[in-house]
Amino acid sequence: MNAYYDDEVDALYLKLGNETPEGVKEISEGVNLDITSKGKLVGIEILKASKKLDIKTILSYKLEVNKKIPTQRIA
């Protein structure tokens, strides 16, 4: 995941994958999901981001893995 913040327009973009988005779904005012044609989430755009969340917390994070991640067996 990559996070990009543009303080000139107060927009935050979270890039979740390398696939090209084919469409956008607005889930609330100024919060948009970028999706592929198969419905895979590849990005999140947040406009007026500093009014919706604490920018400092999203740009510095800690990853904690507490559970075993499920895996698939390939025959």
Image: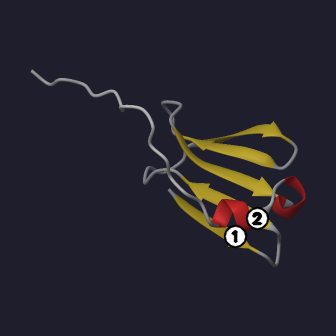
- Please, what is the three-letter code of the amino acid marked with disc 1? Tyr
Considering the image in quadrants, where does the C terminus appear? top left
Residue 4: name its quadrant: bottom right
Label ID, residue 30:
none
Q: Where is residue 40 in the image (x, y as percent from the top left)?
A: 50, 35
Q: Which residue is drawn at 43% across and 54% down?
A: 18
Label ID, residue 55:
2
Q: Residue at x 80, y 60 (%)?
A: 54
Viewer-side residue, 63 vs 24: 63
Binning the other alpha carbons within 10 Å of mark 2 as few (below 14), some (14 to 19) or many (20 upward) gives some
Q: Position of residue 43 (x, y in %)?
A: 59, 49
Q: Where is residue 7 in the image (x, y as percent from the top left)?
A: 79, 76
Q: Could you say whether the residue bearing mark 2 is in a helix, strand or loop? A: helix
Viewer-side residue, 59 vs 48: 59
Q: Which residue is drawn at 65% across and 49% down?
A: 44
- Please, what is the three-letter code of the amino acid marked with disc 2? Ile
Q: Name the residue under label 1.
A: 5
Q: In this view, does 17 lie to the left or right of 28?
A: left
Using the numbered discs, state the Cα–Cα distance from disc 2 to disc 1 in whole angstroms.
8 Å
In the image, residue 34 sits, relative to residue 3, either above or below, namely above
Residue 59: name its quadrant: bottom right
Which residue extends farthest bottom?
A: 8
Tags 2 and 1 in contact by the CB under 8 Å rule?
Answer: yes
